[in-house]
Image (tube, rainbow, N blue to C red):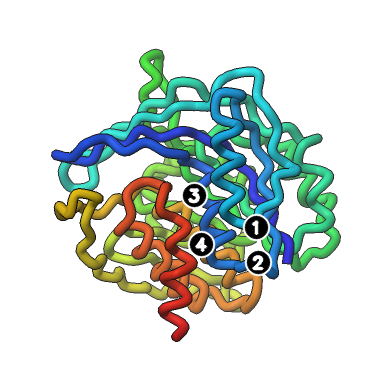
Amino acid sequence: MNILVIGHLCYDEIHPPGQEPVSGFGGIFYSVATLAAVAGNEHKIIPVFGVGEDKRDELIARFSEFPSISTEGIYTLECQTNKVKLFYGDADERIECSEMIAPPVPVSAVQPFVKRSDAILINMVSGFDVTFDTLYMINDNKSSRNVPVYFDIHSLTLGIDENNKRFRRPMMDWRRWMFYANIVQMNELEAATLTLERLSEEQLAKIMMTLGPKVMLVTRGDRGVGVYQADKKKVVQEEIPGIQIPESENQTGAARTPDPTGCGDVFGAAFLFRYAKSGDGIDAARFANRVAARKAAMQGSNELRRLTDDLLKEAE
């Protein structure tokens, strides 16, 4: 199976409450590394995004840890890699600042890989990752209508001010974005603020199913995920409960708090892999929930290779 992954890369500086900052690759890196970890070497992961010259060698070295990742779709940006600062407070409050957002991934960079893809993940890491032209092209070039297109709304609901601080705002054209997706992911805050009408999740899911998606996922942090699926003319909902995150230690042996950074990206990647194999939304959500909980016990993205070992232990 070939899985195409599209979105923006960034380099995160994470500031957990009361702890030292942690730096590492973020954004689409979480999606790509997770797919490589859960899919194993018999599948191919094809990421398409740009990286600045300042981080290219480091990125390629990191991806070399995963034999299933093909780097043929990675291109060099004329600008530096986007640097994102994340400041966490109490109750998962987060302030996000982006210093340099790349231009959208060109249609010409994505097109060569669409026809040979068995599943496609679009993660709106910055909110400016792709344009409508890319969505149209993907729809026209899919070799099969059965190729699932997974769309993570992510930062599509965020604007950016003159100080590079991101802020939440409703989207007037959200229906247009959903039209070509089969599976849509958002968190609770994104679901609550996506529409100008402030639709409830249930209302949003009903409209969503008339546009094209068959599954709508609403992640709830440590409380799990809500799964909305089309069932004939109805929309059915099932709640997958959260998983208690085991205590972990940093390199000095001190206890560290769970890190939610990238957990949504990890969830989406794990869900798409499982769903592409089984077609079962509930089974895929349960699997993705477990993988995301394992990631929360890791700081940043530097330990994602451990997901493979964790899943092998689970299978024993």
Extreme top residue here? Answer: 162
Dot in front, 3 or 4: 3
Dot in front, 1 or 4: 1
In this view of the protein, which residue sits in the foreground, 89 or 54? Answer: 54
The image quadrant that residue 117 belongs to is bottom right
Which residue is tagged 1? 67
Which residue is tagged 3? 30
Give the amino acid at mark 4: Met
The picture places residue 211, in percent across and down from the top left corner, at 63, 56
Dot in front, 2 or 4: 2
The picture places residue 16, in percent across and down from the top left corner, at 23, 40
Which residue is tagged 2? 41
Give the amino acid at mark 2: Asn
Extreme bottom residue here? Answer: 316
Real-space CA distance between mark 2 and mark 4, rounded to the nearest whole angstrom:
29 Å
The image quadrant that residue 120 belongs to is bottom right
Element assignment for label 4:
strand
The picture places residue 224, in percent across and down from the top left corner, at 33, 66
Tell me whether circle 2 and circle 4 mark residues in contact (CB < 8 Å).
Answer: no
Element assignment for label 2:
loop
Element assignment for label 3:
helix
